[in-house]
Image (spheres, helix red, strand yellow):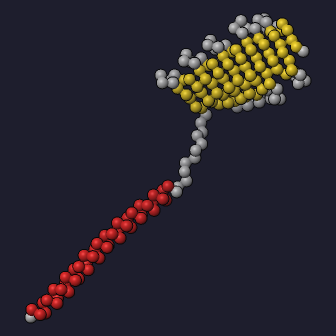
Amino acid sequence: MEHLIEPRTSELTAVLSRLKKLGTQNRRFKQIGAVALILLGSVFLMGQASPPRTVEANEFVLKDANGRIRGKWSMNGDSVLFTLLDSKGVIRVLLAQDGLLDQAALHLRAANGNQRVTFEVDSKGSPALFLQSPDSNLVYLGQEESGTATLRLFGTDGKVLWKAP
């Protein structure tokens, strides 16, 4: 009778050993499957359409460390405006493109907000430069309707003091 028990014990041991080995292999396959599924999911999520890199707005505001507005990029009707302000909130630089008149201009202003320098291009493409002193004397360098270059000096009363040609 001992003879019959021995082979069954060795067979049982062999079966248990195989089951243990299969359990280990099964666990490894599950782990590998889980990792593969995570990687596949990650690739899928990364493969989604990336968000657009365009930012759309009607106005951008730049503030300093104290929360004061120091710059704006905005729309005003059909016009595009880019303004830079000093620490007191006075507009010192204004870059504008007028959509209605089809003009572009760069305005530089004094600390009191008064216009001092203007570079302008009108709808016909004619350039102009305006220089204004604090006492309201004005220098104009630009083009006549005919395309001829002109230089004009204006007095404080707005009358032409000198003109060429």
Above/below status of 34 relative to 67: below
Q: Nearer the viewer, residue 158 or 84?
A: 84
Q: Nearer the viewer, residue 85 or 1?
A: 1
Quadrant for the C terminus, please: top right
Apparent side of residue 133 relative to residue 88 in the rendered image (left or right): right
The x and y percentages for residue 158 are 79, 8
The residue located at (82%, 26%) in the rendering is 126
Query: Taking 42 as reference, is 78 left or right?
Result: right
Image coords of residue 9 (percent x, y): 16, 86
Q: Residue at x 69, y 21 (%)?
A: 107
Q: Is residue 77 visible?
A: no
Give the residue at x 76% y 17%. 130
Q: Is residue 59 above or below residue 89?
A: below
Residue 93 lies in what quarter of the image? top right
**Percent from the top left, x then y, of residue 114?**
67, 13
Residue 32 placement (x, y as % from top left): 37, 67
Q: Name the residue nearer the viewer: 160 or 24.
A: 24
In the rendered structure, the answer to whether residue 104 lies left or right of residue 60 reads right
Is residue 83 visible in the rendered image? The answer is yes
Image mark count: 0
Q: Quadrant of the N terminus?
A: bottom left
Closer to the camera in the image, 29 or 87: 29
Question: Vertical placement of 38 versus 139: above or below?
Answer: below
Residue that lies at the very extreme toward the left in this rendered image: 1
Q: Quadrant of residue 80?
A: top right
Q: Is residue 153 depicted above or below 12 in this figure?
A: above
At 58% from the left and 44% from the top, the residue drawn is 53
